[in-house]
Amino acid sequence: MSAAAYESALAGVLGTAREHAEKVDREAVFPAESMAALRASGLMGMFVPREYGGLGDDLHAYTQIASRLAAACASTAAIWTMHAFQVDGLSRFAGDRLRQAVLPTIAAGGTYLASVTTEARKGADLFTAEAPLTWRDGRADFERDAPVVTGGRHAEAFLITLRRTPEAQPHEVSLVYAERAQLRIGEHGEWDPLGMRGTESIGLTISGSVSPDQVVGQPGRFEDIARESMVPLAHLGWSACWLGTACGAFSDLLRWLRSPTRRGGPDLGSDLVRERLARIRVDLDLVSAYLTRLCDELTAARSAGRSWSDAHTRLRVNTLKLAASELTFKAADSMVQLAGMNGGYSRLAPVKFERHFRDLRSARLNHSNDRMWPATGALALLDPKVTLL
Ligand SMILES: Cc1cc2nc3c(=O)[nH]c(=O)nc-3n(C[C@H](O)[C@H](O)[C@H](O)COP(=O)(O)OP(=O)(O)OC[C@H]3O[C@@H](n4cnc5c(N)ncnc54)[C@H](O)[C@@H]3O)c2cc1C
């Protein structure tokens, strides 16, 4: 798809996402209108190969779209991003029959794919699973607790991590594709978080039965899919969402500051105010530059058939996530400080920062930075030459 075609596909979605963002946040409900617009736009086919009617893979387009959507509605952007990176895993690792059966419908916007990786006791650890697949008469049964499922009430299909068999070790994780019609789904808990409220990431109990070709990739080898596709694309996509959210807020702030009708607020002649503006701008530019450069590097690696799972790439992907999640929230925090009590902190403020602030607070929790910092430190030890991006 050309840049102009992406632009026109996106144009129809942005207005809807912006229009409904406040309501979706206030009521903590799924952005049904924005999703309908996304389904109609062709953008749900991101990472579906062209031969199946999709958009193919273009990492720069992917992150640009995530950022632009997030400036309008961070929840809509996160929902789309999560769908997209799962589609990549499915497109690359599913067998032929499953690809032929599901990819055209995904490309046409008929199937929205939700993610089930978190589990109650093991938390965010992607590379282990507790609930097993139990094989009987050529089918696999499972019962899975899923405490956080974005769009879980609305998705037509799910990618679910499960232990390969009841006897398998926790790290022998299989990835299963299952459609809603194949599943019994119960809901539990309530969804009322501080931010990202429109993702409606409810708790589910999912049970069902699938055929062997619904196991995506090698049984027990989810790690390959995660490292070669889903983890790098998740961190690129989420980082783009956070950057877009922060840039949208900064743009609103600058417009308000420059408005001739503004009453009160900071003095633009003050060096302190200008320095604060510069610091916000520098943080956002640094995240943007790292994101773009990493997209270049990952694109080149994929085109050359090189793996994404080497230690250097993992270090860079983690670095992006850690930097983006911390610097974009820091920027939002500085914006609130700069705009002040009535300009930024109040829900009635002329610039609506508080939604962005709450949304961005989730960035460090999502694939918890507490887990990622030590893992990234271990990767840094493997590179005594300090090979920077
Ligand atoms: C907006 C949003 C949408 C999401 N959507 C989905 C979804 O669709 N599907 C899905 O499966 N999951 C989803 N998640 C879940 C997410 O990916 C994480 O799995 C989840 O946020 C982790 O939960 P937790 O905070 O309990 O952290 P855990 O990783 O379970 O950790 C629990 C606590 O221990 C701390 N901790 C863990 N390891 C360490 C360590 N090494 N050192 C120090 N402290 C540590 C953490 O900081 C945390 O306080 C979503 C999360 C968010 C924020």
Image (tube, rainbow, N blue to C red):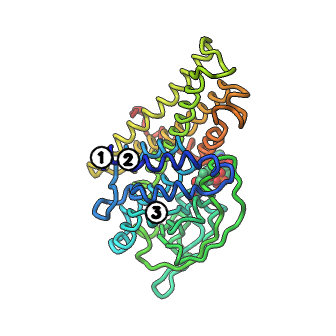
Question: What residue did someone put label 2 on?
Answer: 8
Question: What residue did someone put label 3 on?
Answer: 222
| Disc 3, SS | helix
Image quadrant where residue 313 sits: top left
Question: What residue did someone put label 1 on?
Answer: 2
Q: Residue at x 48, y 67 (%)?
A: 175
The x and y percentages for residue 287 are: 48, 34
Query: Is 313 displayed left or right of 192 in the figure?
Result: left
Quadrant position of the C terminus in the picture: top left
The x and y percentages for residue 131 are: 59, 70
Q: Residue at x 62, y 45 (%)?
A: 362
Query: Is 217 displayed left or right of 144 in the figure?
Result: left
Local crowd size for mark 2, using a 10 Å CA cut-off: few (<14), some (14–19), many (≥20): few
Does residue 389 sit above or below 367 in this rendering? above
The x and y percentages for residue 126 are: 54, 57
- At label 3, the amino acid type is Phe
